[in-house]
Image (tube, rainbow, N blue to C red):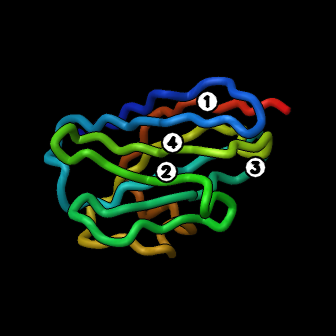
Amino acid sequence: QVQLVESGGGSVQDGGSLRLSCSVYRYTYSRYCMAWFRQAPGKEREGIADIHTDGGTPYYADSVKGRFAITQDNAKSTLYLQMSTLKPEDTAMYYCAAAPRPYCSEGDLRDKVVFRYWGRGTQVTVSS
């Protein structure tokens, strides 16, 4: 069973930065679409960035484009989300997700059922 473990969340001031990590266990870090989602209280879970383990174009939701960057270290089986210029509206639980498929697309960010494996999340709180 694939296991995803997020870390790096915390509390920051408006305009601050954080880097989230997602460590992947029990499978070879290959042939998966990896993504970050977030969910604020009372809101739907939102896909914000994805990238394929084997390379290719990363995709971002408009809400984070230009502020967040999704990267990965295949040797460490770890996915990252570098978040900059954080805003109070970025406050949410952030989840890592994985879909066993040969590609990623921007559309995957709007179709969370594609992602078979999920972590438990890490909380990010941005105060003004």
Q: Earlier in the sequence, mark 2 or mark 3?
A: 2
Residue 112, placed above or below residue 9: below
Q: CA distance from mark 2 to mark 3?
A: 16 Å
x 76%, y 43%: residue:
87
Q: CA distance from mark 4 to mark 1?
A: 9 Å
Q: Earlier in the sequence, mark 4 or mark 1?
A: 4
| Residue pointed to by mark 1 | 123
> Badges 2 and 4: C-beta atoms under 8 Å apart?
yes
* Disc on res. 95: 4
From the viewer's side, name the closer residue of 54 and 85.
85
Q: What is the x, y in percent for residue 126?
A: 74, 33
Q: Secondary structure at mark 1?
A: strand
Q: Earlier in the sequence, mark 3 or mark 1?
A: 3
Residue 7, placed above or below residue 97: above
Q: What is the x, y in percent for residue 30?
A: 18, 56
Amino acid type, residue under disc 2 in the picture? Trp
* Disc on res. 36: 2
Amino acid type, residue under disc 4 in the picture? Tyr
Q: Earlier in the sequence, mark 1 or mark 2?
A: 2
Mark 3 nearby-residue class (10 Å; few <14, some 14–19, many ≥20): few
Q: Secondary structure at mark 4?
A: strand
Q: CA distance from mark 2 to mark 4?
A: 6 Å
* Quadrant position of residue 31: bottom left
Q: Earlier in the sequence, mark 2 or mark 4?
A: 2
Which numbered disc, 3 or 1, marks the residue closer to the eye? Answer: 1
Amino acid type, residue under disc 3 in the picture? Lys
Query: Left or right: 107 with respect to 46?
Result: left
Furthest residue in direction right, as rendered: 128
| Residue pointed to by mark 3 | 43
Q: How many marks?
A: 4
